[in-house]
Image: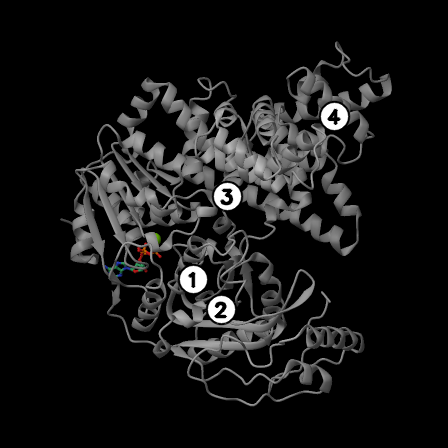
Amino acid sequence: MFDYLQNLNEAQREAVLRTEGPALVIAGAGSGKTRVLTYRIANLLKQGARPSSILSLTFTNKAAREMKERIASVVGENTARYLWMGTFHSIFARILRVEHETIGYPSNFTIYDSADSKSLIKTIIKSFQLDDKIYKPGVVASRISMAKNNLITPSAYENSSEIRTADKSMRMPQIVQIYKEYAKRCFLSGAMDFDDLLLKTNLLFRDNPEILKKYQERFGYVMVDEYQDTNYSQYLIVKKLAAAHKNICVVGDDAQSIYSFRGARIENILNFKSDYPEHKVFKLEQNYRSTQTIVNAANSIIAKNKRQIPKKVFSENATGKPIKLISALTDNEEGFMVAQEIAQLQLRDHYKYEDFAILYRTNMQSRIFEESLRKRNIPYKIYGGLSFYQRKEIKDLLSYFRMTINPADNEALKRIINYPARGIGATTLSKLEAAAVNNETSIWKIVTDLPTINHANFNKGTVGKIMKFVALIEKFRELSANNDAIDTAKTIAEETGILKELYTDKSPEGLSRHENIQELLNGIQEFSINALETGEPEKLENYLEDVALLTDQDNEKEEDKNKVTLMTVHSSKGLEFKNVFVVGLEENLFPSNQNNDNKPEALEEERRLFYVALTRAEENAWFSYANQRYRWGNLDFCSPSRFLEDIDGQFLDSSGVAAQVSPARRAESNDDIQPERYHQNSVRRQAPGAFKTRESQNFFNKKLVSLKESNKVQNTFQGDAPEKIQTGMV
Ligand code: ATP
Ligand code: MG
């Protein structure tokens, strides 16, 4: 036994030492599940297991990186490097690239992100002359995704009367045709979407027992973190890989299952016992992350869910302070008050900015917090939303990279064939695309064939322009074959004219786009240096793979250290922060009323999400809500979330909840109002002052519009510079 095991409690140690046979670690948040996996791997390596025989699947690349670093500190970097550790998508993309021939794909297949998928689906809907108000691309995409994650191929889809009936009842009987066409066009483009990476792996293993056997033998140990959020496709891959030796260890918490909308199946955890009758269950009960107050409050929340595996969770950490309630009049005030708390606490208790996180239910809530933090010069980083890699200029340049690696990539080609402008118009492009569809090939094949086969009878001028584009891409392909990522990328940015075009645009937007490209190139430089250091391949295609597989948590850059974190609760899974603000705790926002039709299961999932949010906190937690909020351009009147009532009142501190001056009165007065303060013991369902009638709502709406014009609405907080209430969305 090595010292390292001293850092584990009895139950954790047992789970770490049970290296052979199926093991299920089921435990509440913060009880050291991820730590068990990490130490288990370190222990296996210490005992002489080959690093390449250990497969561990995590939810984010960041989690994999952190685990790898910790393991490296025990067994050394040279050993840790060879572990197969990463997200399902990144590990199986790697395997599919090796086995590409068997599934008929090129090894350099492109990975379509959700924007690419949606754009392709849109194109198909249009080409089928369907109404995109009925066939909404997002909805169609999620039907296709659901099918793939349940291993329903287009032909299985066609044969399933149940699914077809469901489609018909949604007035979209032709989804099956769209799915078929989508799968075909992806194939012709040498592209896979995220779900394909899992689906194709399943098909590969199903149809090629010798290949499955190879990987079963390679991976003597299989481990999965956050098992409660695996979907059927992921579940099956793991099951197949572990079928021979059954050395499988999964860790999870049914109370943290929050991805059912993406096909995650809580049953996977529940069925582990019947899947592996010889299994052993390890229950971890001590939470090491949070204060007793936070753990007990979280327990009181989750106890309200009916469907769950009973679990005990306790903490022996300090009792800690009660969770502070913040009740704001408006969403702007909520932002203001949260920023104020952060500023005060940071000064008073010497916290670093990185010790704070603001967690919200939906990305659109971030704007207000960004503004309030910026006003106080509090540095922050934001995860998710429109990520850096989705910005137009970045996607344009990445599309050149993608074409360079896989020129059959239709979605990339469509973005850049006329960017920067080279006189190839929309009509030309649609003719090219039609020719590609008719000939069942890629657009690239059509354009490279142009000198010999002119499918669409283009005139000489057009052919000349297209051939120039072809020559450019050919040149880049040659370049990338002989150079590393950064040299190739720089040359592409220059020779396409993208850098110059953005440089000459001196508008603030143009400058910022130019900076973004520079930032992308810096990232590639960093990638090349890292690759050199670790001995990993350093080609453009390797960089692209990294970028394609980024998750919401992975956008962290070096300069992001010591900043407040803003993220959705979903992306906070597995993370921890000293201080956590769970914001927007209002009915219809958290719990969200999106796609749930008030089903009890959906509400239970929202409650689990709330449990995840609170259990990220180590020392202090806050819950905030606003009594009025702009949503979709309208002023909504909100009542506090029912979840606040779930919590045992003894864990809450509502002393700071200000009396709500009637918003109507407040708006009427135009002046600074000093809100009276009052104490309350329980949370109100209906905030005082919230409007009960439509008339009073309308009155307030009108008032706010006129106040916006006169710019007189002031913030009401004592001692702070008055701020304008954000009324930009009126
Ligand atoms: P989550 O459910 O949120 O994913 P988890 O069960 O994976 O949580 P970990 O992240 O592994 O929990 O651990 C929570 C915190 O407790 C971490 O900071 C970890 O280092 C610490 N911890 C876990 N076990 C111990 C222990 N035996 N002694 C001291 N600290 C521990
Ligand atoms: Mg964890």
Q: Nearer the viewer, mark 4 or mark 3?
A: 3
Circle 1 packing at 10 Å, graded few (<14), some (14-19), many (20+), is many
Query: Which residue is found at the position 41% from the left and 44% from the top?
Result: 264
Task: Identify the residue at horizontal 54%, vertical 60% (top origin).
Answer: 381
Circle 3 crowding by C-alpha within 10 Å: few under 14, some 14–19, many from 20 = some
Q: Position of residue 249 (x, y in %)?
A: 25, 42
N-terminal of the pair, mark 1 or mark 2, is 1
Amino acid marked by disc 2: Ser
What number is the disc on residue 641? 2
Compared across the picture, whether 90 is left or right of 484 comes to left
Q: Nearer the viewer, mark 3 or mark 2?
A: 2
Tell me which numbered mark, 3 or 2, is placed earlier along the sequence.
3
Q: Earlier in the sequence, mark 4 or mark 2?
A: 4
| Mark 3: secondary structure | loop
Residue 274, percent across and down? 23, 39
45 is higher (above) or lower (below) than 665: above
Quarter assignment of residue 84: top left
Q: Secondary structure at mark 4?
A: helix
* Quarter placement of the C terminus: bottom right
Q: Are marks 3 and 2 in contact (CB under 8 Å)?
A: no
Residue where numbered disc 3 is placed? 550
